[in-house]
Amino acid sequence: MLALLVGCSGGGAPAPAAPVEPALPRSSPASPRAEAAARPAARTRIPAGNVLAGSRPGTAGRRPAREADLVPIALPAFEIDREPVRGDGAGRPLVAHDRSEAENLCAARGGRLCTELEWERACEGEAHHTFPTGPSLDLEGCTLDLGACTSEFGVAAMGVEHPEWTRSDLPESLVALGARAAEASAVVRGARFDQPLASHRCDMRGGLAPRSEVGAAVRCCYGGDPSAAAYPEVATHPVFRAAELDDAALRAALAGIPELAAYAEDFTLHDAEDGDRALARGNAVRDALAGWELAEGPFFWSPTAGDELLVFSGRSAGGTLIAALYRLSDGTYVHGGAFVLAGEDAPIAISRTPPSRGELHWTACFGCAGESGVIRLDDEQVVRVLAY
């Protein structure tokens, strides 16, 4: 019997009107940008507290090379525009195609562009929600009524219609990973209304050229200390490294994961001899792996930059378990993906090879139909343990 387990996982006083900086268009005193700069801003105060920078490994749409693993960062109190800066009588958000223009507009309103961590805290709230409205987001409903689409702190329409400029920049090492490496260096948060739902996560870290044809909306921050905290550096890992963990350590890891706790109490790890037995059941030896390497025991695997999983197999009263657990920065684990041969005590061989970073192979009987499969990171950044 085969069973598959897959993880995804108050407004302050109005600022006085100020002259528009020379960088802003001055063709007419009634231009949308001049009006926006002079218009008093309704603000929301964000209290001092922690932002959980980044996202949970396994989150659909996560960009692990850009997003930290829920690292707590302390921020001082600040104020933020309750809504994006409006650019015309219809109340649509003003889209700036140059970040320096957005900076000048905020300065004319007595503020500044927010840092990306300030934006993320205003979006996720004290509960550290995934989306500005909570654990889920009605994107269509939000675009119909932006004022009703608010975060826990009462900040409206955060990145719902357009991405929003921040004053933060991506590190050069991350910019180099982008499709347009020389351009996408300015951090934006949020996304256009027609982009996938995952793009609207509070922790989604997007990039635009500082001067962009696409452009981004403008939302300003006030007070606080923009130099108080920087986005945490995202860890890098080798593709494979050994994991010196015994049965007791793996039982503790499994016991802390609700999806796999039932296999924890009497779990016993497979070893290299079990791997050879799995090959022998199909009348094969290690040479049959054709360049793939048989894992001698549990190991850490980095299928993509920024993420690392603990991969292992073993037996318990519930059956044979193949597991891939995300390792967090604090040394704890969360569910990535797993596969169970329910009620069976079968040896397992897991093989790997550096050229195939995003995929591993497993087998209980080499070459036997229905007793082999892959451990794979899919396009949505979800780990799947599959049989074929």
Image (cartoon, rainbow, N blue to C red):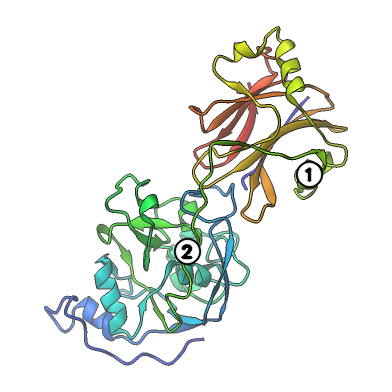
Horizontal placement of 300 versus 233: left or right? Answer: right
Query: How far across and how far down the image is residue 365, in percent?
Result: 71, 15
Residue at left offset 78%, top offset 24%: 1
Depth-wise, is mark 1 or mark 2 nearer the camera? 1
Q: x, y (%) of residue 80? A: 44, 79
Vertical comparison of 298 with 139: above or below: above
Relative image position of residue 5 (x, y in whole percent): 70, 37
Q: Which mark is residue 231?
A: 2
> Mark 1 and mark 2: span between their CA atoms?
32 Å
When the figure is inspected, residue 177 is found, relative to residue 313, above or below; the finding is below
Q: Earlier in the sequence, mark 1 or mark 2?
A: 2
The C terminus lies in quadrant: top right
362 above or below 288?
Answer: below
**Most extreme residue toward the top, as rendered?**
283
> Which residue is depicted at the point 31% across and 79% down?
106
Crowding around mark 1 (Cα neighbors within 10 Å: few <14, some 14 to 19, many 20+) is few
Q: Quadrant of residue 188?
A: bottom left
Q: Check disc 2 and give the amino acid type.
A: Tyr
Helix, strand or loop at mark 1: helix
